[in-house]
Amino acid sequence: MDFMSDSLADGRTLRTFNVLDDYSREGLGIEVDYRCPVSE
């Protein structure tokens, strides 16, 4: 599991939640959301 984030040109934050299989490195699921709070 991993979180990634980036900013769009209009300033909104885009976050993804990725679930990967460690053996095959296959992406099992990716959730994308604009409203996920960024905790730092």
Image (spheres, rainbow, N blue to C red):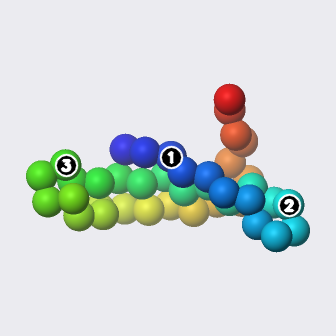
Q: Residue at x 50, y 46 (%)?
A: 3
Task: Determine which residue is flagged by label 1.
Answer: 3
Q: Are discs 1 and 3 less than 8 Å apart at CB?
A: no
Query: Circle 1 sits in a helix, a strand or a loop, which is it?
Result: strand
Tell me which amino acid carries mark 3.
Asp
Tell me which amino acid carries mark 1.
Phe
Instruction: Using the numbered discs, state the Cα–Cα distance from disc 2 to disc 1 in whole angstroms.
Output: 19 Å
Left or right of 6 in this view: 20: left
Q: Position of residue 15 (x, y in %)?
A: 62, 54
Of residue 31 and residue 8, the one placed in the foreground of this image is: 8
Tell me which amino acid carries mark 2.
Gly
Q: Are discs 3 and 2 less than 8 Å apart at CB?
A: no
Task: Determine which residue is flagged by label 2.
Answer: 11
Left or right of 19 in this view: 37: right
Instruction: Using the numbered discs, state the Cα–Cα distance from disc 3 to disc 2 in whole angstroms.
Output: 33 Å
Task: Determine which residue is flagged by label 3.
Answer: 22
Q: Quadrant of residue 29?
A: bottom left
Q: Position of residue 20 (x, y in %)?
A: 29, 54
Left or right of 3 in this view: 22: left
Q: Residue at x 54, y 56 (%)?
A: 16
Q: Quadrant of the C terminus?
A: top right
